[in-house]
Each structure stands twice: as structure tokens, then as C-alpha cells.
Image (cartoon, helix red, strand yellow):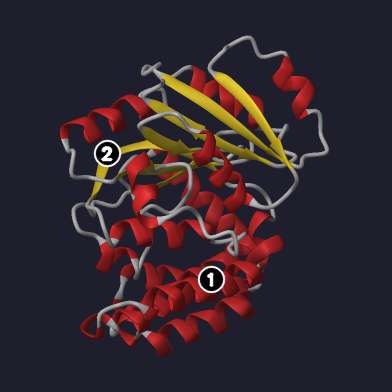
Amino acid sequence: MSKVSVVIPAYNAMTYLPETLESVLQQTFTDFEILIINDGSSDNIVEWANQIADPRVRLISQPNQGVSVARNTGITHAQGEYIAFLDADDLWQPTKLEKQVHYLEDNPEVGLVYTWTAFVDQWGKSTGIVLAFHAEGNVWEQIVVRDMISNGSTPMVRRSCFETVGVFDPNFRYAPDRDMWTRIAARYPFGVVKEPLILYRQLPNSFSRNHEKMIQELRQVIEKTFQSAPLELLYLRNQSYGWMNFFAAWGYLQGTGNYQNAMHYRRQAILHYPRIRYTFIYLRLSLAIAIARWFGLQSYDRARELSRIVRRFIPGVSV
């Protein structure tokens, strides 16, 4: 019996999966098992896995059914007290598991502990962007508005949480995380390790392939969430839609360069949550849209690259 079960869903992921696995094997905390869920891949994952000598690594193959079902397969086979999820193209810093295990051991009431996230490019080089949230404790009112966890590679969850709230909704293939973390937040306090221990890989055109389906599923998640919300908290629904549309605008601008769609979703964000226009990141979005609109996408790309350089080499500077 391992203390931690690491679940890695994989679908034709061999471009990055070996490096992802290595980042787990290099953890300072070593009492874990690794369950790689082969979700109907057509690459050489089976041959590759057969060459792995470490007995802590297991490959479980199934027909292609999407990330939610793959994670649920991992939960079913997991033997650990804690379960940590990792996408097949992301990376962990060496102390990630150690610090999360210590947090859960020291705080037995906490159901989920997450960490900060650092963004890297397709080659694993830092972009200078770090998502750093401080929310902990009873975070339901916060997570239904803005998902502080942000990706599926950061949480470590007590196995008992899934016995209480159920597993991932198999109907969600593009946005299952928000639904799951919200359900856990309704029953358990959250914790946070305030260090960027996740390296989240931003791949070219990854957003542009799935953006409409992502937005559609996020709407479904929001509606599902507020169906059972207390009456006095229904006012948060418009805030949730406001931030969803805001990040959709960013996604269109950065993922596809489509400033027209970015302007549309920015307007939707304001209609749902007018106060969003007074935030600093809204001003940044508006400036980015203006650059792309009036000076062209190449000028916007150059400005974005300059901001990345500044963030990379001058820590603490926000551009």
C-alpha cells in the first residue's frame, strides 16, 4: 500500500509523457504508485511502458473514453490514501508530493491541497507567468466564481473525498476539473502550498482546437453548480459567468489572435459582472485587444514576448 497514488491519463501523449513520468520519479517523497491510464492511444505507449523497470509504475489500458473516465479508472485502481492527478504533458517540481503530503498530514480536516502554477512553453522553458492564489479553508464561494486551482495537475485529494462526493462526471470531457473541485469544496476545506510546484505546459493552438467546447461545458458546469446552491448565494452565478467570459476573451486573443471574438467575450463579461471592468487584469486585456486591433497581431505578439522577457528576467515585475 502506497501513501500516494499518482494518476496520469494519457491519450497519444508520448511526445511529453516520458519527461512527465521522470518528474514524478524524481520526487523527494517516494512512497507512491504511478497509474498511467492509456485512454485508447494509437502510439507506442504500451511498448514504452513495458520497458519501465520501476515497479511503482503501472499501465492500465482502456478504450478511448475521455479524461474524466480515465481519471475515474485511476481512482478505482488506486491504493493510496491520497490521490494526485497529473496531465501527461505537465511537470512537477521535486518537492511537490512531499509538501502536499505534509500539509494533509498536518491538517486532517482538509480534503484537497493545491499549489501555485508556473507556465512553461512547449520546450519546458518558463514564460514568466505564475498563477498564485491564497484561498484556503472554506473556498466554495470563491471557486464557483474563479477557479483558483486552474489545472488538473496541481491537486492532491484525500481518497475519502471521492467516496463522499463521487468521481468525475463522465459527461464532461473538456472541463471536468471545475465541477469536481467545486463539489469537493462544498464538503471539505481546501489547503494551499504557496509555491509554484507545477509546470503547466502551454502548447501551440491547444486552446484553438477546443475553445467552443470548453466554453459550452463551463456553462454546463456553472448551471449544474447553482442548481443546488443556497438561495442567498445565487448572486454569485452572474460573477461566475462574468469571469468565464473574461477568460474566454483572453483565450481567444492569446490562443488564436482573434481580437473580434475577444471583444465579444469581453462585452459578455461586463454584461454579467459590470464591476469586472475596474480590475487591473481587465485593463490589461483591454490594452492587449487595442494593440492587436489597431497595430496588428504581429505587434501584439511582439508586445507579449517583451512582457514575457521582462517577467522572466526581472522577478516581481508585472507587465
Residue 103: % across, % down:
23, 34
In the displayed structure image, the side of residue 291 where residue 44 appears, left or right? right
At numbered mark 1, what does the secondary structure look like: helix, strand or loop? helix
Which disc, if any, is residue 121? none
Residue 231: % across, % down:
25, 85
Quarter of the rendering occupied by the C terminus: bottom left
Query: Is label 2 or label 1 in front?
Result: 2
Mark 2 to mark 1: distance in Å? 27 Å
The answer to whether any part of residue 317 appears in the image is yes
Foreground residue, 145 or 220? 220
Residue shown at 51% from the left, 50% from the top: 306
Q: Residue furthest top?
A: 53
At numbered mark 2, what does the secondary structure look like: helix, strand or loop? strand
The residue at which mark 1 appears reads as: 248
Q: Are marks 2 and 1 in contact (CB under 8 Å)?
A: no
In the displayed structure image, the side of residue 296 where residue 318 appears, left or right? left
Mark 1 is on which residue type?
A: Ala
Neighbour tally class for label 1: few under 14, some 14-19, many 20 plus, Cα within 10 Å: many
Residue 119: % across, % down:
48, 44
Which disc, if any, is residue 193? 2
In the displayed structure image, the side of residue 138 where residue 169 appears, left or right? right
| First reached walking from the N terminus: tag 2 or tag 1 | 2
Residue 311: % across, % down:
41, 45
